[in-house]
Every structure is written in structure tokens, then in C-alpha cells.
Image (tube, coloured by chain):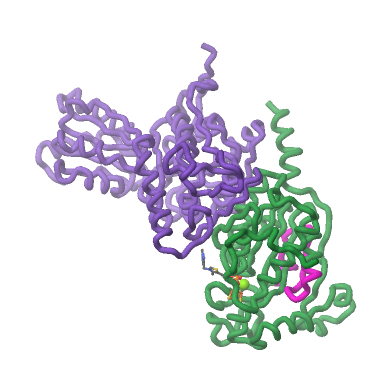
Chain colours: A green, B purple
Amino acid sequence: MAFEYEKYIRKGTLPHIWCPGCGHGIVMKSLLRAIEGLKLDKNDIAVISGIGCASRLPGYLDMNTLHTTHGRALAFATGIKLANPKLKVIVVSGDGDASAIGGNHLIHAARRNIDITLLIFNNSIYGMTGGQVAPTTPIGAYASTMTYGNIDPPFDIVRLVEGAGATFVARTTSYHTAQTEQLIKQAMTHKGFAVVDIIDACPTYFGRKNAPKEAYDMMQVQKDNSIPLQIAQKKKPEELQGKIITGIFVKKEMPEYTDTYYNTIIPKAMGSK
Amino acid sequence: MGKKALLLSGNESCVEGALYAGLQFYAGYPITPSSEIAEGLSRKLPKYGGVMIQMEDEIASMGAIIGASLAGKKSMTATSGPGFSLKQENFGFACFNEVPCVLVNVMRGGPSTGAPTGPSQGDVMQARWGTHGDHPVVAIAPNSVPEILTETVRSFNISEKYRVPVILLLDEIIAHMRERVILPEKGELEVIDRLKPTVPPDQYKPFDISNTPMPLVPPMAAYGTGYRFHVTGLNHRTDGFPTNNGELIEKELLRIMQKMAMYKKNMLKHEEYMLDDAEIGIVAYGSTSRAAKYAVNVLRSEGIKAGMLRYITIWPFEEEAVEKLAEKVKFIVVPELNLGQLILEVERCARGKASVYGVNRVNIEIIHPHEIIEKVKELLHGIRV
Ligand SMILES: Cc1ncc(C[n+]2csc(CCOP(=O)(O)OP(=O)(O)O)c2C)c(N)n1
Ligand code: SF4
Ligand SMILES: [Mg+2]
């Protein structure tokens, strides 16, 4: 039987705002299959976003949803998680939302290892505002604010959050729908700050000034350029130029923030004068 | 009696007030002269089972308290000048989405980094208009350490009852000064909690006012309680979802503003001191009102009939109080630790019926009573400065 996405979609909220060929909708479907696979109750899931095309996602989901300010989703989510630890908290961010304006919150959520799953819809561009350069845009790529080609070196999101202390870090692409579903599932079952960097496509704006231009071809690139981590580890750095390394980069157990707060701070405070 | 009298600073008094009001979530970022609030809550809030977290900055602190409030907890943050500026975007989100929360701003000398330990009342207009767009806001400015406690409780009550963020405007003087405070016993002060929805979850709309016992105030569900609702900073309909329909956009914003107008009288508070037979009016607030009161006493002892109108709720501004005052006094003096902010409202409401004069200072020193007294005497003798 076909998967019943309707079960998780709010009535009357479709059609969504995304352009034809945009990867965001494909990733949303992977997320819903992951949620179904985990047999979670919709009442126990909170989905929070910032601002951008990707950040419009929570509005479509029949869950506890919050569309905040640009870059700040993790801050709001931290308040929600600490206020109600039983909620499964998912943050949906664009690459600009998460790593430019939200970069400070990103590294600090990682440092705290708070039990939040962050999905970064990484299309290497600011989609919503019309194709400006993002901290993830490759060097040399064109953007409406990098008329002569980008000179700002991009972040490697995986290495960034690993360095900041995230305890689950993975990468996949919007093309790899089964892997995306699996990685989101693992991220959500991981206790701690879990990040999935999902390489995604914005044909409308990244495609406008760069090759390939069409959604189909951009998907093809995601497919052809991806290398699983295990294979990549056996290759030389020059062989990995321009490749998308996919898989789980970090998975480790560390004290989780909410847990530590409720199980050590509160008892300590209550026991003191 | 059995009541506990304590010698507290204003910031400590704010902590006691917040705990009394039922604070459950605090997020902040250190900044002088507000840090003692965070420090006090670090020690005390977890004893009540609540959460205190130091976030990475003020933007995050403001976001976190909104998130916690949407998850059903009474929430607060505290800051000062530069941090107050940083909070403005997310504060506007709370105003627009009617998220109850209390933002304490201990005013210090500005602009910019200004004078971290210098007193100021420079953020009066920022409290009203700091975030972009038309929006509702409440700002309350106590003038003593014990009053900080009771006004903190009142801030939470207004915020929860009417679903409006409240700014508690302290200043460096009353925040750091110590005075005797008698802690109220349980039940002595009213503590109000937000309205919860009575409709079943599938009928709940976060901004719907058709099923509310309090006209224009939509009941508020919490995340994780079976009410699955959406909140966005985009213009939204009563069901919380974004809309581009101009009519609906205007209707919703007007509803929020009408709510404020409807309950304004319940949010207002002022003190009148020797106003009955006053011929000279002094309008003051916060720490400066203490110098003003002293000035009134001295002027009275010299046979000059001065009186003081002290605003405790600054925003919304109680126009009628100044209108009434302007009818009967020769002139009004407004001492402020800024270059003239609330005076603009006083002038507006006096409608030319009484002339309005400022006594202003930005040299990070308090306004002394004699400055107000001299100003009054100068004006009485027709010497304009
Ligand atoms: C404070 C603030 N600054 C700027 C903007 C404008 N803005 C909206 S979305 C966006 C970038 C979105 O890019 P990204 O996060 O990568 O998401 P995408 O649209 O690509 O999915 C910007 C700059 C804003 N809404 N708020
Ligand atoms: S502009 Fe780009 S990111 Fe936004 S919806 Fe269109 S394709 Fe997707
Ligand atoms: Mg993007």
C-alpha cells in the first residue's frame, strides 16, 4: 500500500509554497516516513523552524509547530525542550538559516548536546530571498550577491557541528530518499543533539546562475557525486574534490542537557539550603 | 506576624516577585546592571523545579522564553540596554503572537555600550517602539525595591491574563539599591494564570475569540497537551496559519490592538502625590520620582503648591491622568534621566492647556531634588531657561 502522507499533513494547508523541482518537499516526505517508522504520536512531536523556504515546512504538519524568526529556531526549540522534556523536538532549517544568522545558536545547541534533531535543508543558497550567497555556497559559484563568483569559502556543516560537540552527525542528499529516512530515524532516536545535513536543490535560484540548471540534472549530480563515508575513507583527498560524502560521521553517547538539568541540577538545588 | 523582612536589592526583589508569581522558566545572558537577577534565579529557580539557562546571547534568551511559554510555562528574561536592543526582533514575535512573558530591562546609560553602571531612563521610547511594526506592549516602571516585587507579580499577571508581553523597566539605581522588603505570604497577592482552552483539540484555533470567556483574549493551549496548533511570525489567520489576505491581516492586528484598548484601564497604574490642590505638576516615574517627591515636600514647605503624578504603568500611556492635571496646574515639569522621552507623551496629552518643561540629565548621575525645585522656582518667577 502507498504511504499515507495525509495522516501527517494538516488539512487545508496544501499546496505548499515550494517551486516545482525544489528538493524541500522530497525531504519532507522522508521525514514523515521516518516519523511513521518510529511510531511516534503526533501530539508528542514539536517541529520548529526559522525563516526561509525550508522553514515553511512545519506549517504543513499536523503536530506542535512553530515558525520563528530567521536563524533562531534552535533558541525557541531549546525553550520548548526544557519546558516539556517529553516532546520530541525537530528543528527544520535552511542552510542560511542554520549556519549564517543562526550559526551562534547552532554551535551552542551542539555544545550543550540538547536532545533536538536538526535537519538542515542545504541547497547552498538563500532560496526565499532570491538566490543570494550562503555560507554553504561553493567557491566560484554565482549568486545574486556574488555577481563575479563566490570568494567566501563555505562551511562544511558536518565538521562545524562535530567540532562544536554534536553527538550525532550525518549527511545525505534529497536524492537519497531511503537513506534520508533512515538517517532522520537514527537522529531522532539518538539522545542528544543530532544533525542531518541534507544536500538539497534549489533549481529556481541556484540553478538560475549555475550548472546544472534543471531540477532533474541537479538530482543526478546528487546521485553521481555522492560517496558513502566508508568508501571515501579509503580515497585520497584529491579524489574527493567536489564529492558529497554521505553517511554517519559521529555517533557517540554524552550526557544530554535536559536530562542533566532535571536529574542533577534540580535535585541538587532542592537538597541545598 | 511571622512575616519575613529582608534587606534586598532591587534585582533580588525582582527574583522574589518572579518566584512568587510562579516563574518556571528563565533564560538570560549576563549584562550589568541586570546580572543579579540571573544569578539569583540560578540559585533559586531549580529549587522550585523550574529551569534557568544562560543562553549564548540575548536573542537566544528571548527566543527560548517564548518557546517555553508556548510550552505552557511562565517565562522571563532580564537584560539591560545593549541586550534590550538585541531582544527586539523576537520580542515583536511575542507581541504579535500574544505570547505571555516578562522582559526585565534594567536601564543603564546609553546609547551603545554607554555606561554599564550608570543610571538612566533612556529606554522609555524603545520599550514602546523598539520592535518593528505596530504592536501592543505593556511597560511598568516601579520606583522602589519593595515595589519591584509587587510590580513583578503584576507584570506576570497582566502578561498571563491578557496574553501580552510585559516589559519591566527598572533602572540601575533601584536595581542595585537595597531596601527593606517584607515578603508577601502565599495568597496575599493575586497570582493569575493564562486562560486555557475549553474546546476539544480538533476545534482549537490559537487566535479564535469566539469561545473565550474574556472578550478578545484567545485561550492559550500549550505544546504537548494534545492541542496541535501552529504559530508563525507571518501575518496569520485565527487558526494560526499564514495569510496574504489584506482584510484578514488587518482584522487580526486590529483585534490585538482592540484587546489592549479594552483592557487598558486594568493595566494602568499611577500614584498621585499632593495633587488635590496642586498648582504645579511634576510628572515622574522610576527612581527619578523619588527625587520629585522630595522636591514636592520642600516646595510645599515653602508654600508652593506642587504635586506629583507618578506613572507606574508607562505603556500603555494613561492620557487622562495628564489631561486632568493640565486642566488645573500652571505648568508641568517632567524630570527624566534622558534627554526628554516621556515628556513627549505629557506634552501631547496636555494639549497646550499647561506648558510642559523637562529636567534632564545624561551625565550618569541621578537627578537631585534641588534641580527640580530650582526649575519650578525659575518658572514661577517667569525666568525661562
Ligand atoms: C532578521 C532577518 N534577516 C533577513 C531575513 C530575510 N531572509 C528570509 S529567508 C532568508 C534566507 C533563507 O535561506 P535559507 O535559510 O538557506 O533557506 P532556503 O530559502 O534556501 O530554504 C533571508 C536572508 C529575515 N527574514 N529576517
Ligand atoms: S526558491 Fe529554491 S528553495 Fe525556495 S522553494 Fe523555490 S526551489 Fe525551493
Ligand atoms: Mg538555502
Is residue A161 found inside the magenta-colored segment of the image? yes
Is residue A25 found inside the magenta-colored segment of the image? no
Foreground pick, A143 / A42: A42
Foreground pick, A23 / B34: A23
Residue at horizontal 71%, vertical 63%?
Answer: A5
Q: Which residues are magenta?
A: A156-180
B175 up-or-down from A118: above or below: above
Residue B18 seen in render: yes
Residue at horizontal 45%, vertical 29%?
Answer: B150
Residue B331 rendering spot, x and y as whole percentages: 16, 38
Residue at horizontal 65%, vertical 82%?
Answer: A139
Relative horizontal placement of residue A215, taking residue A40 as reference (left or right): left
Foreground pick, B196 / A213: B196
Residue A187 rendering spot, x and y as whole percentages: 78, 59
Relative horizontal placement of residue A188, taking residue B374 as reference (left or right): right
Residue B84 rendering spot, x and y as whole percentages: 47, 50
A266 up-or-down from B261: above or below: above
Res. A37 image quadrant: bottom right
Residue B227 rendering spot, x and y as whole percentages: 62, 46
Residue B287 seen in render: no
Residue at horizontal 59%, vertical 38%?
Answer: B39
A174 up-or-down from A8: above or below: below
